[in-house]
Amino acid sequence: MNGVIIVNTLKRHLFAVTTMVWGLSVTLPVLAEYKPIEQPVEPANPNLKIESRNDLFKDQYPKQYQTWADTAKSTDLDSVNYEDPRVVVLWAGYAFAKDYKKPRGHFYAVTDVREILRTAAPMTPESGPMPMACWSCKSPDVPRLIAERGEAGYFGATWASGGSEVVNPIGCADCHDTTSKEFAEGKPALRIARPYVLRALEKIDHKFDTSDRTDQRAALCANCHVEYYFAGDLKQVTFPWDNGVTVDAMEKYYDDIGFVDWTHAVSKAPMLKAQHPDYETWMLGVHGKNGVTCIDCHMPKVQGADGKVYTDHKIGNPFNAFEHTCANCHDQSKEKLQAMVKSRKTEIKEVMLRLEDQLVVAHFEAKAAWEAGASKEEMKEALQDIRHAQWRWDYAAAGHGGHIHAPDVLLKVIGTGLDKASDARTKLVRVLAKHGMTDPVTLPDISTAENAWKATGVDIEKARKEKAEFLKTVVPQWDKEARTKGLLPAEK
């Protein structure tokens, strides 16, 4: 982006950076020096065998495989950037501002991360902005590679270098020990093979190997549906659970170590980007507290035509299998429960949009304050409030199904976010007044995604053109190499 320096928070230290912003020299404030927490780096584990190809199990488990394959029917790729252009401003300077789509089926996990503009268009294995860690939630090839290379060998590489290795979408070996005797005998053989997930679970007293079956089934989803960040020079996937799993506990963790995902391109605030803290919100909600797991609602046991019961692997909306999910506990009708859920979703969305509006204004008020000559010290507290307010918005917005999992938690999170945004704007008004600006700050037109991209300096057409060339030339070569290695079935 022209005139914008994005602070690379994946490096060991963050410093105040000086850049030209809208023709004005500004010293960017940062939270503190980033001090990565020391943590284990697991070596290669040749004894850990992982068969990552999902197609190899379709004959042994035809019903489970077919229902998993049916996640391919979730084809909608709605763009949040177009639906709600405010997010382009909220993520200004970060890759999510270019492209953020609503999630679809697990079948597309690899396809979608290849095609999203966020991963850019690396034309060689060494190029591109993203680290190898960006594959980590997408495929059973990931634990296979960690077992083969160790965490240092896996994380210490570029995203593009993994293109021909991470090719099988989320599937069997993400949750099961597919090479075990138990699995061959038709038993679940539940396993988490990503070492960083096992470490995180131990921090919250959920050691996988000693957990009961209920906790194990839920923890499998923590392979991916969690908040995480890329720590230190190694860019190692790490869950910020040292203080707990609440929004406040994770915020304190990030503040204490001085972690910043990026410096906002408009306000210059030191920002945090939430991922998808579904496991955390589930734990805090009524279902989690009562032992109703993700599997119970999204992968229920159903009876096939042959009368045999099996687990439906078409992960989706619980209402699509109401008699096997919600009706196991609730005596209300499907229609009544749907109306309740819809109402909660609407209420949460309305409050969330209010917070978005406040944040958009706060970012542009901060921009105006910098242009008026505000100092780093004058801006520090307001920018910290922006950081905390948007972290709460993103925590609520990035998750899936929070309006069902823990609506009370989300409303509290968003409510405290509104408080933080109000605090930020109050402080910014004082800074602006101190520098002679008493009129309301004029906002640019961000009524469409195109206008918002223009207002924040994003050349979206350039990004799309580069991505199209990447998909045309590089991705087919990745798949060809993967087939040569036996990681994908041969073309028919």
Image: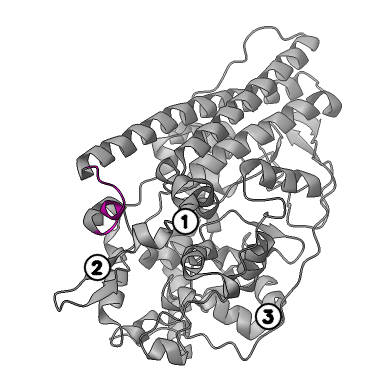
Camera-side mark, 1 or 2: 2
In front here: 286 or 197? 286
Check disc 1 and report its element: helix, strand or loop. loop
Q: Which of 468 and 340 is in front in this view?
A: 340
Tell me how the rendering is colored.
one colour
Is the Cβ of the residue at disc 1 closer than 8 Å to that at disc 3? no
Which residue has dot 1 on it? 116
> Which quadrant: the C terminus?
bottom left
Q: Residue 12 location in percent, x, y?
A: 81, 57
Estimate the x, y position of residue 170 in percent, counting from the top left: 44, 70
Up/down of 402 relative to 158, above or below: above
Helix, strand or loop at mark 3: helix
Q: Which of marks 1 and 2 is nearer the N terminus?
A: 1
In the image, is residue 325 part of the stretch drawn in magenta? yes
Q: Which label's residue is closer to the chain start, 2 or 3?
A: 3
Q: Name the residue under label 2.
A: 302
Quadrant in the rendering for residue 65: bottom left
- Give me the residue at 65% from left, 27% from top: 420
Q: How crowded is mark 3: few (under 14 residues within 10 Å), some or many (20 or more)?
A: many
Q: Can residue 171 be seen in this view?
A: yes
Q: In this view, does 209 lie above or below 180?
A: above
Work out whether residue 207 or residue 67 is closer to the camera in this orientation and state it.
Answer: 207
The mark nearer the N terminus, 1 or 3, is 1
Q: Tag 2: residue type?
A: Val
Q: Residues within 10 Å of mark 2 (few under 14, many from 20)?
A: some
Q: Mark 3 points at which residue?
A: 150
- Residue 447 placed where, x, y %? 44, 27
Residue 342, by quadrant, is top left
Q: Residues within 10 Å of mark 1 (few under 14, many from 20)?
A: some
User: Which stretch appears magenta?
Assistant: 324-332
